[in-house]
Image: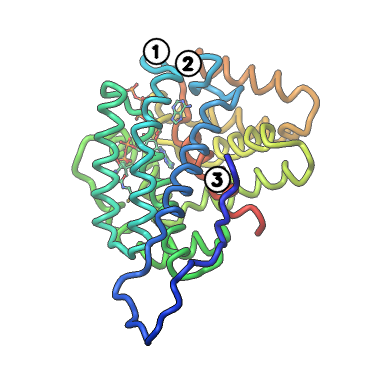
Amino acid sequence: MPELMLEAPLRRARPKRPVPVPARPVVDRAFCAAIARRTVRSLYAELTLYPKPGLVSLVDNGSHDDMTAATFMRSLFALRHYFRDITRAGMEDAPFTTLKRLGIAAEARMLAATGGINTHRGAVFCLGLLCAAIGSCRARGTPLTAASVRATLLLRWAEGLAAHTQVTSGDSHGLRAAQRYAASGAREEAALGLPSVFEVALPALRRTLAAGRGTRRARIDALFALMGHISDTNLYHRGGEEGALTVQRHARAFVDAGGTGADGWEARALACHHAFVAARLSPGGAADLLAAACLVQDVCPGD
Ligand SMILES: CC(C)(COP(=O)(O)OP(=O)(O)OC[C@H]1O[C@@H](n2cnc3c(N)ncnc32)[C@H](O[C@H]2O[C@H](COP(=O)(O)OP(=O)(O)OP(=O)(O)O)[C@@H](O)[C@H]2O)[C@@H]1O)[C@@H](O)C(=O)NCCC(=O)NCCS
Ligand SMILES: Nc1ncnc2[nH]cnc12
């Protein structure tokens, strides 16, 4: 795919007389489409990464018996317009209620495409928010850096995101994990401006890239850093507190041993995969946040 000039200035016809300031920011459709492509590409990068403990990849279905890589591909295809539309909503300075409405409609399309299987609910939420923040930066002429994307997310939608953490009605796995184990999950992660993406996964990704170990190992290191750090409600749902602690212990041991910089890393990652599959554990929240970090790295590679 040819690289898009993300920083290319907007082209405007030279006005013959003073033009009134537009009431709404100018929407750059090509930019929205490019961000949507990059978002889908980040999710595809997560899907194809291997070994990825307990998770679905092109090699096997990990801890899942109800979904395969093909289920994820159908989901990705169904979500491509959503990422374009939510980038555009961010450019148009839309309120949180609009982002939420787009997210709920996208979830419905995902479920229709997968026959009711939740492949990307966390991704619809987290990567959707990132797309909106990227769109908002672009509309305001703010340079696209990881820091500016995070700051925009917090400045623009903090109130709505905070209110979203107060929702207690409903019967999602995440809400049940929050009530039973005080697990924080996707809502709190977003309300804090995705700290696991910007402070954990992205630095891990960049450290491995800077050490010259390449993209695949960088993504593996970022995934293990996330698994060792986050409160993943999918793990609480499947394995209770013991399951969540097991994943953290394995992930931290991998990181402490030097991650992909240490000899034998691949065998250790594979052993971890087999242990999670045996226990039916699947760190789906970490997988979504890895894709989010890949998106930020792709859109803001230089800061
Ligand atoms: C805010 C919502 C995302 C709802 O969140 P809630 O916490 O109420 O619950 P869930 O329905 O459980 O969905 C949360 C998904 O978020 C992922 N996740 C988990 N922990 C974290 C974390 N710490 N940080 C970030 N993200 C996290 C996780 O997604 C992955 O796991 C999925 C599989 O989950 P699940 O269905 O529970 O499990 P299975 O093992 O498949 O179950 P069974 O086989 O037993 O049936 C996988 O798909 C990954 O995506 C959680 O699933 C949200 O729903 C919401 O408000 N949506 C509407 C608004 C919106 O999207 N707006 C967009 C912009 S504002
Ligand atoms: N590759 C994957 N396997 C299982 N659950 C996931 N959620 C997001 N990506 C996933």
Tell me where residue 54 appears, x and y as whole percent.
51, 21
Q: In whole angstroms, how far apart are the C-alphas of marks 2 and 1?
A: 7 Å
Mark 3, ligand 1, within 8 Å: the answer is no
Residue type indicated by callout 3: Ala
Q: Nearer the viewer, residue 88 or 172?
A: 88
Residue 61 is marked as: 2
Residue 293 is marked as: 3
Disc 2 + disc 1, Cβ < 8 Å: yes
- Residue appearing at x 55%, y 45% in the figure: 293
Residue type indicated by callout 1: Asp
- Residue appearing at x 33%, y 50% in the figure: 85
Q: Give above or below for 225 relative to 112.
A: below
Q: In whole angstroms, how far apart are the C-alphas of marks 2 and 3?
A: 23 Å
Q: Which residue is mark 1?
A: 65
Tell me where residue 231 appears, x and y as whole percent.
46, 40
- Residue appearing at x 57%, y 39% in the figure: 1
292 relative position to 126: left or right: right
- Residue appearing at x 29%, y 45% in the figure: 103
